[in-house]
Amino acid sequence: MNEQILRVDGIELCTESFGNPNDPAVLLIMGATASMIWWEDEFCQRLADRGRYVIRYDNRDVGRSTTYEPGQPGYTLEDMADDAVRVLDGYGIPQAHFVGMSLGGLLTMLVALRHPQNVLTATLVMTSTFSPGLPPMEEKVEAFFADTAKVDLTNDQAAIDLTVEKWKILRGSKHPFDEKRIRRLAIQEIRRANRLASMFNHGLLTGGESYIARVREIEAPALVIHGTEDPILPYEHGVALANQIPGAVLLTLEGIGHELHHNDWDRMIDAIMKHTAEQ
């Protein structure tokens, strides 16, 4: 692991790399309200051990990257997509294989349309274009996020418990909930956050609409990974996305929720390795 802070265009982006810089680069983009550590160390290292130079980073408003006043994000989704290219530029890498989870998948699609020259392949995990007619998130998730405003995030224990509860709600039925593992990551998340409450700025972001409408124009080879029990973006979102992007391949994870469960890493890493080896 090799963490560094990139200072560019008036912001700071905290990044970390794994593996040999001479190997093909894979850029991991995490979802809303979650820092890069949810791409767990072991997941990143396993990709690196199989011949990929892996880079993960904190989006704005999470982890050690630039934060904004809670409720006042000073940036758009397009800005976040451009941050991904800023990270590549900081490492001197002209092209990479992009892997995005949830909001990170949406950002990957924006990069593929705004900066196609930088994207070798796109792997889109538990994400969507939010096309009309697709099922909404489950009521239990809506209720959970509605209650987050009541939590005192300056209380570390309350913040840890909130994070654990979030991942418990988002999981599928196939695997037992590994609370010890999630709690350890939650503690790490809170300890390294510049300003924890700013993470909810991600729910206020605007922009990207004109690009989302052009998903069919994505030319980068796409792999879509989606769980059949995703309570935020039900499985139909993944199916629709795979049908919208020309030539996209869909990997279905039976019984999996909106999560990167370690019991699924073998299938995911195998699929990413195969997908990125073809370009």
Image (spheres, rainbow, N blue to C red):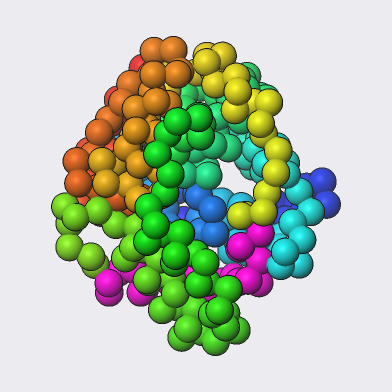
Look at the image and tell me in which quarter the C terminus lies. Answer: top left
- Which percent across, then down, holds residue 236? 34, 33
Q: Nearer the viewer, residue 232 or 8?
A: 232
Q: Is residue 6 visible?
A: yes
Per the image, is 99 magenta?
Answer: no
Kindly give the residue lying farthest to the right in the view shown.
10
- What residue sits 45% from the left and 31% below the top? 133
Residue 152, located in which quarter of the rendered image?
A: bottom right
Left or right, 60 with reference to 223: right
Residue 236, above or below 144: above
Q: Main secondary structure of the magenta part?
A: helix
Residue 127, above or below 183: above
- Which percent across, then down, holds residue 91? 63, 40
Left or right, 102 with reference to 173: right
Q: Nearer the viewer, residue 246 or 86?
A: 246
Residue 66, located in which quarter of the rendered image?
A: bottom right
- What residue sits 82% from the left and 46% below the top? 9
Per the image, is 198 magenta?
Answer: yes
Q: How many marks?
A: 0
- Which percent across, then down, holds residue 73? 74, 56
What residue span does the magenta drawing correspond to?
Answer: 179-201
- What residue sits 45% from the left and 18% below the top? 245
- What residue sits 54% from the left and 53% below the top? 32
Q: Is residue 42 visible?
A: no
Q: Nearer the viewer, residue 222 or 28?
A: 222
Left or right, 18 with reference to 193: left
- Which percent across, then down, holds residue 205? 68, 49
